[in-house]
Amino acid sequence: MNLLAPSILAADFAVLGEQIRQADAAGADYIHIDVMDGMFVPSISFGMPLISSIRKVTKKVFDVHLMVEEPQRYIRDFADCGADLLTVHAEACRHLDRTLQQIREAGLKTGVALNPATPLNALDYVLDKTDMVLIMTVNPGFGGQKFIPGTLEKISELRKKLDAKGLKTDIQVDGGINKDTLPAVLKAGANVAVAGSAVFQGDIEKNVKMLKEIMK
Ligand code: DX5
Ligand code: ZN
């Protein structure tokens, strides 16, 4: 199934709850929550207190994208503040296999993110512990960047690899996704699309409905 995950990084934090409600009502499937630590990526975004607060405004899946060094330090905290799905970067985990195991033990779904320069074989021995693979379509750290076209080949290679193993693992794409880039990533085999600016800039309801229409 194709799913839309609006990234709240692009929302207006002064009215964040209201904007999440609008995205939810318009048909968003997940709420994508970008946590940045100022180490793995240059920016610092927000953390657990914000996630606990917005947990009250929607029942949608909280898809938490951790751009954090050694994220296993915080698995319990993210579970406690309401995360449903925790995505960690392969590049940020010294013991990726153990980290994924711990996320599942905490009762959450697992995601592994790969930066544009990271090869797919980083996943080879952890696919059985991965519910979703996040193929970054920009270099992580900021919203509003331009989609990197070379990532399309990576998405289709991953879809082939998963099909060959009979796996139904979700493929998420994140960065520069909008009405123009969405058709190509879907065609390549992605089925979960993150969109920040393309949802929160302008009319949220209209944007969500338009992107969902493309995903049908
Ligand atoms: C980038 C973040 C993205 C970002 C996407 O580091 O992981 O989720 O918010 O923003 P857009 O859709 O504006 O590229
Ligand atoms: Zn993200």
Image (spheres, rainbow, N blue to C red):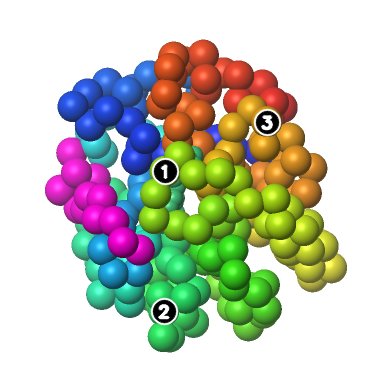
Which residue occupies 54% across, 65% down? 115
Locate residue 184 relative to residue 84 in the image: left or right.
Answer: right
Asked if the residues shown at circle 1 and circle 2 are in contact, with their CB atoms under 8 angstroms apart, the answer is no
**Ligand 1 within 8 angstroms of badge 3 C-beta:** no
Mark earlier in primary sequence (3, 1): 1
Pointer 3 residue? 180
Query: Does the numbered disc 2 mark a residue whose Cβ is under 8 Å from ligand 2?
Result: no
Q: Amino acid at mark 1?
A: Gly
Dot 1 lies on which element? Answer: loop
> On residue 38, which mark appears?
none
Q: Which mark is residue 143?
A: 1
The magenta-colored residue range is 41-53
Residue 166 or residue 36, whichever sits in front: 36
The answer to whether residue 54 is magenta is no
* Number of numbered discs on residues: 3
In this view, 126 is above or below 138: below
The amino acid pointed to by label 2 is Cys
* Marked residue nearer the N-terminal end (1 or 2): 2
From the viewer's side, name the closer residue of 174 and 216.
174
Q: Is mark 1 within 8 Å of ligand 1?
A: yes
| Marked residue nearer the N-terminal end (3 or 2) | 2
Q: Position of residue 97 (x, y in %)?
A: 49, 82
Q: Which residue is mark 2?
A: 93
- Which quadrant does the N terminus fall into? top right
